[in-house]
Image: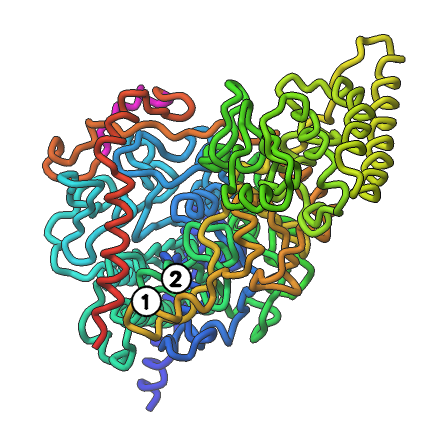
Amino acid sequence: MQAAVTVLIVLLSLDFLSAQSQSDLRNSSNVQTGETGQKTKNQPHIIFILIDDQGYNDIGYHNPTIKTPTLDKLAAEGVILENYYVQPICTPSRSQLITGRYQIHTGLQHSIIRPRQPSCLPSHMDTLPERLREAGYSTHMVGKWHLGFYRKACLPTRKGFDTFFGSLTGSVDYYSYRSCDGPGLCGYDLHDNERVAWGQKGKYSTMLFTQRARKILESHNLTDRPLFLLLSLQAVHTPLQPPKSYIYPYRDMANVARRKFAAMVSTVDEAVRNITYALRKYGHYRNSVIIYSTDNGAQPFTGGSNWPLRGRKGTYWEGGIRGVAFVHSPLLKRRRRVSKALLHITDWFPTLVGLAGGNISQSQGLDGFDVWPTISEGKESPRKEILHNIDPLHKYLTETKSSDNKPTKKAAAVSPTKGATFKKPKKQKKVVKQKLNKKSGFKLKATKKPQIFTQPATKSKKSKPVSKLKQRSGPKSKPAPESKTKPQFQHQPILYNKPKIQSSGTPSASGAFNHKSKRTTSQNHNLSQSRPAQNKSKKQLKEQFKLKSKQMFLQNQNISQSGSPTPRLQPAPPPLWDTSVQAAIRVGDWKLLTGDPGHGDWVPLQMFPTLPGRWWNLERSSAPRYKASAHKNVWLFNITSDPFERQDLADQRLDVVQQLLARLAYYNQTAVPVYFPPDDPRANPSRHGETWVPWADEEEEGKYQGVYKKGKNAKKKRKKKCQLCKLKSFFLKLNTGMMSNGI
C-alpha cells in the first residue's frame, strides 16, 4: 500500500513538470515570434468569402426558391448587411477590396483588366494583406484574382499573400481551367503560388478551392499567428457548369439557365458549410470573423436575378451595385439582426486592419471607413456618401461635337442646324393651301420640334421675314409645356453641361438678335394689312415681342456699361458638370446618375422558357415620357423611400441635383488618369506553353501612359468587319437559345 502511494506521488510530480515545460515552451514561442499571448488572442481569424456575380435575389433569405440553408443560418445568427454596396463589375470591386480606394484613385475606373492587358494594381499602393501581414497575420488567398498578372510584381504573392492557389484571369472553365480571350487565344489558368498547377483537370473548381481552404485551416497552428483567408470563388460566374447532382433539386424550374445558376449557388452553400465545419473542427471558430460578400450584381440573361431591384451586372442601377453580404462571428456584440447602415466594399480595408490591431494611419488616401462598431454594436455608420464611379471614357455616342460645328443625330434633334430648311410635313402643306388663298413659301430654320405654321405658302422674298417672326412668336402665343414638365438637363444639360442661348427665338448662324428685333414692327404692320382676321393674335405677339426686345436691350446695355464691346450673346456661367459622362454617387438618401448608367429595366424572375416573351415587356419602359427622353442623362432617386428606383425626382428636386453634381465635380478633381492600355500580343498563351503567365519584364512598368486609342485604320477595319452586327447576332442567339431550352 505504501509503495502504491509513492508511485502515485511520482506520477503526479511528472505530470506537473510536463505541464510546466509545455507552458515554458509556449512562452518561449511567443517571445520568438515577437507577439505576446494576449495580442495573439485578441486578433481574430478573418475568413473573407467573395462570390462572383451573385444577385440580390440569388440567396435563400431573399428568395426561398434558392436552397441555401447554410448561408441562411449563418446570416440569421449574424448581421445581414442590407445597405451594402459593391461595384458593377469584377475588377473594380476586387481592387477596392484589396486597396480600400475608389477606382478613380487607382486608374481602373473604365473597365475590367483583360488577360492580355499590361495592367494591374498600382505598385506604389499598399494592400489589405500587406497591412495584415505587418500586424502579424498569416495571409492566404484561394480562387479568382482578376487584378492583372502581366508582371510577376502583379501576382497575389507579391501583393501581400503568403500563398495563392487559383486562377489569374476573369473566367475559366470549371473543369478544364481553360480561359479564353478571343478566338484562338485560350490557355490553361490554374496556379499554385507562382507556378502552374498542372494535373487538376476534371476537378470542379468550387470543390477544389474549398478543399485547399480546408487544408490551410487544418495546417494552421492555433498558437501561431492569426489567419487571414480570402476565399474568392469563381462561382457563380459563367460558364454555367454545375455538377448534375446539384441540378435535381431545381428540376421544377422551367428556365434552364436559372436552374443551372441555382444549382451553382447550392455548390457555394455547400462550400461555406465545409469551411465553417473546418473552423469548428480545428478550433478556429470561437475567435473568427466570417464575412460573406458578392462582387457585383447578377446577369439575368445567364440565370441570375436582382429582382425587385432595377438593372443588372455592369450597370449603376441598384441591381448592379447593391450587394448581398453578411457577417457571422461569435465576437459580434449584437447579433441576429439586419443592419441598414450605409456600407461600401472599400470599408473592409480599414475595418479589418483596425480589427487586427494594425496601423491604418500608414495607409494614405483611403476612401473606406472603419465600420466594425456599426456592424458589431449597431452604431451609426461613419459613411454618409459613396462615389460609385466616374468614367470619363464612357459617354453618349451621340454627343455633340462643338469643335467643327457638326452636330450628331442627337444634336440635330435638339439644336438647329445651319442652313436647314423646313420642308416637312408634305401633307400639312396641302392643308394650308386649301385653307388660304394666298401662296407664299418660307424657308424656316429647324427648331427643337418641327412646328406647323399657318402662313401662306408662296415663295415671295418679301414675306420671308414673316416666317422668322412666326417662328419666334409662334411658341409664345401658346405656353410651351416642355419648360414646365421637363427640366432643361434632360436633353441638353443647360445648367450643368453646355449653356444654352437664351433668346426670343431660334438664333441664326450669325446670331444677330438685334437686327431681327428691328424688323419686328414693320413685319407686324405688314401682317396686319394682309391678315386682318387675326387681330387678337397680332396684339399678343406685339406685346410679347416688346417685352423680349426690352430684356435683350437691358442685357446688352448692362454689358456695354462695363467697358467691353457689346456682345451678341449673354455670357453663360462655367459648366458645373458634364452630364454626358457616366457617373453615379450616393449622398445620404439620394442617388444621382449621369450619362449612360446602363440597361435600366426591372427584370422579373425567369419563370418562362422563351425570350423575349410577354413577361419581358411587363417591366419595360413603355410610357411616352421615356420616348421623349431618349437622350436623358440625369436621374435622381431617394433610395430610402424608393429602393427600386421607380420614381425619378430629377425634375422636381433641382436643388438636390445641383448639390450632388457639385460632389461629383469635387471627386473628379482628385481622380487620377484612366489607365487602359492596349492588348499585348506577347501575352498569347501559345508563346508560353498554352498557359496564362506573366510575360513582361519588371522594367516595363508604366510603358503605356493613359488610355489606348485606336487609329483611323483600325476604325475602318472595324467597320468592314461589322463587329457590332456580330455582337448583336451573338446576344440574340444566346438569349433565345438559353431561354428556349426549357423542359
Q: What residue is disc 2 on?
A: 54
Indicate whether residue 701 is drawn in magenta.
yes
Indicate whether residue 82 is drawn in magenta.
no
Residue type at mark 2? Gln
Quick one: label 1 or label 2, which is nearer the N terminus?
A: 2
The residue closer to the viewer here, 284 or 386, is 386
Q: Position of residue 491 (x, y in %)?
A: 59, 41
Location of residue 149 with respect to 300 vertically, above or below: above
Q: What stretch is highlighted in magenta?
A: 694-702
Q: Which mark is residue 268?
A: 1
Q: Where is residue 673 in the image (x, y as percent from the top left)?
A: 49, 27
- Camera sees residue 188: yes
Residue type at mark 1? Val
Q: Which mark is residue 562?
A: none
Q: Position of residue 559 (x, y in %)?
A: 84, 17
Give the residue drawn at x 28%, y 62%.
Answer: 210
